[in-house]
């Protein structure tokens, strides 16, 4: 029964997406879950300034990718990585020369406890640390970055027995926030959220200690509204929002 309900709900959502798809003043934007709240703010400002409407489709990068491959009506795809947009580009499913990096993720060492994490991250050596949460490096770009930092710091083998892995960055955050781990490597965007700012304590990992976490987008359907939205994403208003939500914004030519 539950499966039937979910299938009906999915089909209704799909029909809602199709309805109005050919409206030239509305674009369908598939956005990765980790960027959803930031994209809500950006799309509202875009509508206020241009009059174009943005219909956001929230979900995981993997699910969006699979649906787009199956022909889902999406104008622009904002992924949590650079891999899937590149594949779509290589397969000819995107508009040529429109793939670009819209945000660069950052990892932090975080605890919900005030003043627990010091400005240099030395707390990671503290004997009071019983569990350190990271996202699974095999599945999540933020997990790969966390493991890379620990390896570059010579800490991976020393701390391996204390590490607990979340399936994704959301579950990793939950492990720490619930007390199942007292430290965790999470996305800066999860803590530097306008509704969540200054909760707990954290140390921002230097960018030089791990490979950049690039989040790419690609235009899938040629429309004036889609082109305008990409231009807006690269502009100062969107950049300010991206920074406010804990990401770095690339410099565009």
Image: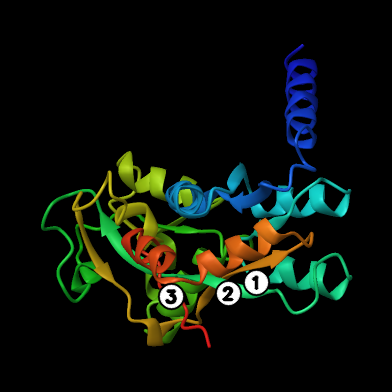
Disc 2 marks which residue?
A: 101
The residue sitting at 45% across, 81% down in the picture is: 210
Secondary structure of residue under mark 2: strand
- Badge 3: residue crowd in 10 Å (few <14, some 14–19, many ≥20): some
Tell me the distance, in whole angstroms, between the alpha carbons under discs 3 and 1. 26 Å
Compared to residue 214, the image places residue 34 above or below, namely above
**Which of the 4 image quarters holds residue 157?**
bottom left
Residue 140, image x, y percentages: 58, 61
Q: Is residue 83 visible?
A: yes
In the rendered structure, the answer to whether residue 70 lies left or right of residue 15 reads right
Q: Are marks 2 and 1 in contact (CB under 8 Å)?
A: yes
Give the camera-side residue of 59 and 240. Answer: 240
Q: Name the front one of labels 3 and 1.
A: 1
Dividing the image into 4 quarters, which one contains the N terminus? top right
Q: Nearer the viewer, residue 236 or 175?
A: 236
Residue 121, percent from left and from top: 22, 72
Disc with the residue nearer the chain's start (3 vs 2)? 2
**Please, what secondary structure does the residue beneath circle 1 have?**
loop
How far is mark 2 from mark 1, CA to CA?
A: 8 Å
Q: CA distance from mark 3 to mark 2?
A: 29 Å
Residue beneath label 3, please? 156
Residue 94 drawn above or below residue 76: below
Residue under circle 1? Answer: 82
């Amino acid at each position: 029964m539950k499966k039937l309900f979910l299938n009906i709900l999915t089909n209704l959502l799909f029909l809602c997406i199709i309805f109005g798809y050919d409206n030239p003043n509305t674009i369908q934007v598939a956005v990765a879950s980790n960027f959803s709240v930031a994209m809500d703010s950006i799309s509202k400002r875009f509508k206020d300034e241009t009059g174009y409407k943005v219909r956001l489709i929230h979900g995981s990068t993997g699910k969006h990718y699979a649906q787009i491959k199956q022909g889902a009506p999406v104008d622009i795809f904002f992924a949590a990585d650079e891999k899937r947009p590149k594949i779509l580009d290589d397969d000819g499913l995107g508009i040529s020369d429109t793939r670009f990096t819209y945000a660069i993720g950052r990892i932090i060492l975080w605890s919900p406890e005030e003043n627990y994490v010091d400005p240099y991250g030395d707390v990671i050596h503290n004997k009071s640390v019983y569990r350190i949460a990271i996202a699974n490096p095999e599945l999540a770009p933020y997990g790969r970055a966390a493991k890379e930092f620990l390896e570059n710091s010579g800490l991976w083998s020393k701390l391996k027995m204390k590490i607990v892995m979340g399936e994704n960055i959301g579950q990793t955050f939950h492990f720490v926030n619930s007390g199942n781990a007292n430290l965790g490597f999470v996305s800066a965007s999860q803590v530097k959220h306008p509704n969540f700012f200054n909760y707990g304590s954290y140390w921002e990992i230097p960018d030089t200690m791990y490979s950049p976490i690039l989040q790419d987008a690609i235009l899938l359907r040629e429309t004036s509204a889609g082109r305008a939205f990409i231009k807006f994403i690269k502009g100062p208003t969107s950049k300010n929002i991206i920074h406010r939500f804990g990401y770095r914004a690339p410099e565009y030519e």
